[in-house]
Amino acid sequence: MNRSATTTPRLHAYLFWAALTLSTAAYPQQTKAVDASAPPASAEESEPSAEEKTKQELAEIISQVAQYQTALDELKGRRSQFEGMRQEMLQEMLNARIERTLDQLISFSHKAAKAYLDKANIPGFDTERSRVIKILESLPVTVGEEIERIRRNLKLPRPEQTPMEQAALGADLAEAAERDDKLVQALIANTEFAERIDLDVSAAKAAIRRHLARSAENASAYLDVTSNDLKKLRRQLRTLPKNKDLAERIAVTEQHMLLAAEILRRRAERMDSLGMKVAAFDAQLIAATGSLSTKIFDWSVMKGLARDFFNSIVDWIEANGARMMFQLLVFLVILAVAWKIARLGELIVQRALGSMRANLSQLLQRMIISTTRSVIIVLGLLIGLSQLDVSIGPLLAGLGIAGFIVGFALQDSLSNFASGLMILLYRPFDVGDIVEVSGAFGTVRHMSLVNTTILAFDNQSLVVPNNQVWRNVIKNVTGQATRRVDMTFGISYGDDIEQAERVLREIVTSTEKVLKVPEPVIHLHELGDSSVNFIVRPWVKTEDYWDTYWTITRQVKLRFDAEGISIPFPQRDVHLYTQAPRGAS
């Protein structure tokens, strides 16, 4: 007979027997207990009082707790019968049933404590109080036994195992850690209920702290081990880049490192809620994973990061004392080369921008050139540090923290930075332009991402924040290639209008810097209080504006004097009226 043919019916029979065995375990029945000795209640009897109802409800909950405790004890007894036997499937089924029963026991125990505390002010609850106290005192023992069993059965991956075996153990470890964390939460909640009933929970809290401290230390050590293993595997992969086994082991080790970090994070949160010191663990998490959290603002954590960075430097010096001078020389050479490359890159970018057809502003060109130089120098510095084998992870984390704090404190500077980018993008002005903005009038000399420097015509340097520039009206006097010169000249009412208009036109057309197109505008504009006013509006190149203005003004004065045309000043006519005195005949 085929062996597989006989094995299958036996397996099915075994599974059926196991399921039947589990199903016959004592399981709580949510039924209301009835006292057989009590006489039947008559319809005429009154409803039970509120106090009696409360006691009855609490008694039912306590009865459920007792039933779940009995069921749990029976299941544990059955599990002990199969320990040492190769009945893994049955043991897994038993463990699942025990976990579910224990969760129900915890839930109903805390439900009983809450129900008692809600009605503790009602007199006559002494019996219920003693029963609730017994439940709260016995529950930590039951939960502690389960936590200890989880710890005993815990198996960590070993280097000689295959990646598949290590991954399976990692999954078991994650499940066990999650279960342990849930049970610890139950113990913490149990102590809170016990405190509200005025019980002494110092011993229970001390036990929880010891467990959390031991578990956190184990997770911390496991995180260190997996981090070191990951570094070794990655160095091996650089030597054997096509080795699939190494790649698989690296992937599994990364998952184990993240799992260890997650376990340590949960333990640190529980310890912090109990007032325990966790700064060292928080610093280790940030240094190992590089992820930031609100813990980074804790001064103890920042000191731990700085201490780790300093220790890494000390360890590096001790391990590389003989090569230190040589590596330092290499570091300096790399910095010098990076500086030279930065200068060369600056020249190349400058020439490339000059030969481009794109019409980029000088401000944007300067920003691109300076950014190129800075990026090359920073890259050179990082390459130099990597050649020194210095661990820059904690340093980068510290720089990120410092940058966040500085950025939060200097919000106005960030606003100036954003405005500077908008100015570079939309180009409302360029270097050398004459502008009027935010009360400053002069020539643009320099601009950074924070402020703009304007040189006033009296040689004063005005530094204007970019957010003040961008959110106000920007008047670019030299933004266009040509400008119109607006002038007004007045003659007296007794002068010849045709003669004055002819003289003005001759002056404008004879001025060398006046453009022919657009054609100058010369017209009688208004009849003022003291003069007849002409407008004169010639067009000139922007750079010739003031020369033309001053030249035409001077020529008008000279020609008007020569032609006998007066330039009136404000005057007022006074009229006197005489009136005869009263009573005169």
Image: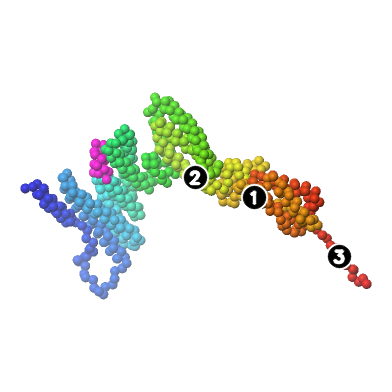
Give the alpha-carbon distance from disc 1 to disc 2, as whole Å. Answer: 53 Å
Q: Secondary structure at mark 1?
A: loop
**Amino acid type of the residue that numbered disc 2 sits on in the rendered structure:** Gly
Give how far across and how far down residue 373 sits, in percent. 49, 36
Q: Residue furthest top?
A: 322
Is residue 111 visible in the rendered image? The answer is yes
Q: Is residue 157 magenta?
A: yes
**Amino acid type of the residue that numbered disc 3 sits on in the rendered structure:** Tyr
Residue that numbered label 2 is attached to: 407
- The residue drawn where x is 30% and y is 48% is 178
- Magenta range is 151-171
Pointer 3 or 1: first along the chain: 1
Give how far across and how far down residue 138 sits, in percent. 27, 51
- The residue drawn where x is 31% and y is 45% is 207
Relative to the observer, which residue lies in front, 5 or 557? 557
Give how far across and how far down residue 263 sits, in percent. 32, 45
Mark 1 or mark 2, whichever is nearer to me: 1
Mark 3 touches mark 2? (CB < 8 Å): no
Is residue 411 visible in the rendered image? The answer is no
Give the alpha-carbon distance from disc 3 to disc 2, as whole Å. Answer: 78 Å
Give how far across and how far down residue 14 sits, in percent. 13, 51
Residue that numbered label 1 is attached to: 517
Pointer 3 or 2: first along the chain: 2
Residue that numbered label 3 is attached to: 577
Pointer 1 or 2: first along the chain: 2
Residue neighbourhood size for the residue with mark 3, other residues' Cα within 10 Å, grouped as few (<14), some (14–19), many (≥20): few
Q: Secondary structure at mark 3?
A: loop
Q: Is residue 123 left or right of residue 532?
A: left
| Picture quarter with the C terminus | bottom right
Relative to the observer, which residue lies in front, 71 or 419? 419
Q: Is residue 246 above or below residue 10?
A: above
